[in-house]
Image (cartoon, rainbow, N blue to C red):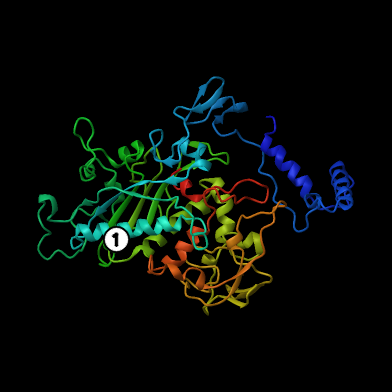
Amino acid sequence: MAPSLRALGLAAALVACASPTPAADASHDAAADTDARAKDAPDAPDETPCDGPARDALEPDDGCPLGYAGDGCAACAEGFVPREGRCSLARDGEREAWPNDLSRANSDPWLVVHHPSLRVLRPRVLALNFVNRNEPDRARGLLERITAAFREGSRFHGYERPEALPQWDYELLPVRDLRDGAKGRPGPPEAYPYENSTLYPRRMEGGRLVLDYARLFSEDFAQHYGFPDEAGRPRTLCDLFERGDVNELWLVGSGDVASDAAAYEVLEYKQRYDARGNRVPGSFDPAAGNGSFDARVRPCRVSVRVGFVNYNRGPGCFLESQAHGVESVGRRGVVPAFSRWFVPFAGFDLDARHGLPVRSFYDVQCTTRPCISYPAPDVLELEHRGRRYRVEPYHAPCGNAHYPPNGVRDYDIQSTTEVLSTCGGFGQRDRCGQEPAPVALTHAAWRAYRALAGDCDGPFLVWWFQSMPGHGSGRAHADGGPMLSPWPYLYY
């Protein structure tokens, strides 16, 4: 396959930024000639060779381009059709927003093709209120506060850029009222022990109640979604996701009665992709959330995400739930292009980057807590399984859902410890692929969000989301490849 213009451009950039080495080959000679010309022309700084560590390798030019598949890339990939000698989307066109008239369902290849140009996503979320004591206005009010927190979190570097626009702006569909006594249904039985209604899907497993996710996908439960087909029959959950009527399902419930069925924070059944953005036909990851769907759940033909909103908590706790789902998709490699930048962003590469015995701070085990300390802003000390490790210099990444960049334990979002962090400049590159110098950081960076999402790790997570590469941010890998914004990946 002929090299792309992008590959040729990156190769030229690498020649311009290569540091001289003793190797006597043609590429070195070209770089040496460039270096000599630069010395003769000091007013041309772009010719100066770059210092610092070697840049990342280019993405391998293997596999089929987006839209192509098969031997020799002679066939069209899933979701593409042959047209005028090339593989194209069946329905195509530029749009600034998703969903739209051309694309509305999760896992649509249109979303992959147009990811770089999408200005805003307005995914449709359907919420089911199961809590008998949770009045409709209260349920709606909590959900609106949650969506407002996500909206703020999608403003790239909004903490320092007042003009930043949100990219993740949920469309909240009418909340379905599944309380006992609502819509003409009978009230709860006498001496009913639970806060969640009798419609809350439960089953026994191992002598305890668990949430029956499979029932949510059943024809019997479909009547509660309120989406009839042309013949008046209720559409099932898979129908709703595959048609794009719904892009996420949220269960508003109570987690405060220990004997009731517990729910996962967020589950996702996720379509797998290859490195070029093509869907892997028929391949889904049932454990792409913070847990796994069991084998009883009927699989759909598109990605499905189901979140649990505790009615007695605030927006910050559900931000944390969704953050765990983002972590899972990013860590598991379901969408390789997303994982490529998310893993270093969130510090899930401590073993590869610093030679530590753990991939992330989630894996640290010690008997005397905290296991982590920062004796100086650029020094990390860590105890794991009886051994101590020291990294110097250490420049903190952006952290994960439990550990902010300066945290020494879970949920340490009030830490006043100062660390040097690369988070603010993550993906910001000069012409040689180098990121800016790290800057000092403490909890002061995110405390302004306490009013918006004050519970759990909410304030930090608004800042964390804002720190991710945003639409039009220009953030890039060291090889020049773009870091696309995270929000479309969530609906691949």
Percent from the top left, x then y, of residue 458? 41, 65
Residue at position x 53%, y 42% from top?
116
Tell which of 75 and 86 is nearer to you.
86
Tell which of 384 and 252 is nearer to you.
252
Q: Is residue 389 above or below residue 266?
A: below
Residue 107 placement, left or right of 239: right
Q: Is residue 244 visible to the viewer in this orientation of the structure?
A: yes
Q: Is residue 282 visible to the viewer in this orientation of the structure?
A: no
Residue 411 placement, left or right of 252: right
Percent from the top left, x then y, of residue 76? 53, 27
Q: Quadrant of residue 205?
A: bottom left
Element under disc 1: helix
Q: Name the residue tied to disc 1.
A: 142
Residue at position x 46%, y 63% from top?
461
Residue 336 placement, left or right of 60: left
Percent from the top left, x then y, of residue 190? 9, 63
Instruction: Say which amino acid is labelled 1.
Output: Leu
Percent from the top left, x then y, of residue 256? 27, 67
Residue at position x 69%, y 45% from top?
58
